[in-house]
Image (spheres, rainbow, N blue to C red):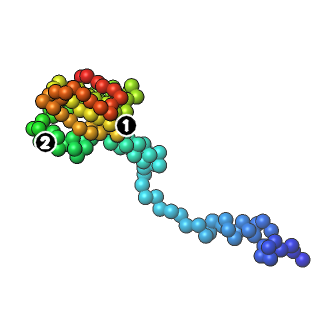
Amino acid sequence: MTNVIGNRFSSIEQVTNQFLSPTGVKETAKTSDISFEDVLKIKQNEQVMESSELKFSKHAAMRLASRGIDLTESVSQRLENGVEQASKKGIQESLVLVDQLAFIVNIPNKTVVTAMDQTETNSNVFTNIDGAVIM
């Protein structure tokens, strides 16, 4: 007489054969030659690229358009460098001055919140910032 475990199996071999049998396992087709590690690196690089791009809020874009301010490649590059410097210093909301233009930038989100030219900065008062970068 054999000992029945749980009224079904008499040995661990029977459990193994029932649940861990290779005959019941289907081979999965290889869908790609790219490893998980490679996919992870690609996604991380995409996030770094996305997070490094400076964005403009709707308000800032409207301000630039309504004032006829055209950002040159040089001004854009200097603005991005200013944002990078502010980030390194731990600034959260920064005033970034580039030539005659002033930008309020949310540094963690890398988003220009508002933009103004020399005519709008006559009062020289900026609120809700915790740092300034002059480029």
Residue 99 in the image, given as x and y percentages of width and height? 17, 24
Vertical order, 21 against 116 (above or below): below
User: In the orientation shown, which residue stands out farthest toward the top?
Assistant: 134
What is the secondary structure assignment of the residue under circle 2? helix
Report the residue at 33% width, 31% height from top.
129
Looking at the rendering, which quadrant does residue 70 occupy? Answer: top left
Q: Tell which of 115 and 23 is nearer to you.
A: 115
Q: Residues within 10 Å of mark 2 (few under 14, many from 20)?
A: few
Can I make out residue 94 in this image?
Answer: yes
Left or right of 47? Residue 3 is: right
Q: Quadrant of the C terminus?
A: top left
Left or right of 44? Residue 115 is: left
Can I make out residue 78 in this image?
Answer: no
Residue 11 in the image, given as x and y percentages of width and height? 80, 68
Q: Tell which of 88 and 120 is nearer to you.
A: 120
Disc number for residue 38: none
Report the residue at 24% width, 41% height from top.
56
Residue 43 in the image, given as x and y percentages of width and height? 40, 46
Residue hosting label 2: 65
Left or right of 28? Residue 95 is: left
Q: Tell which of 52 and 115 is nearer to you.
A: 115
Report the residue at 47% width, 62% height from top.
29
Q: CA distance from mark 1 to mark 2?
A: 25 Å
Disc number for residue 108: 1
Query: Identity of the amino acid at label 1?
Result: Pro
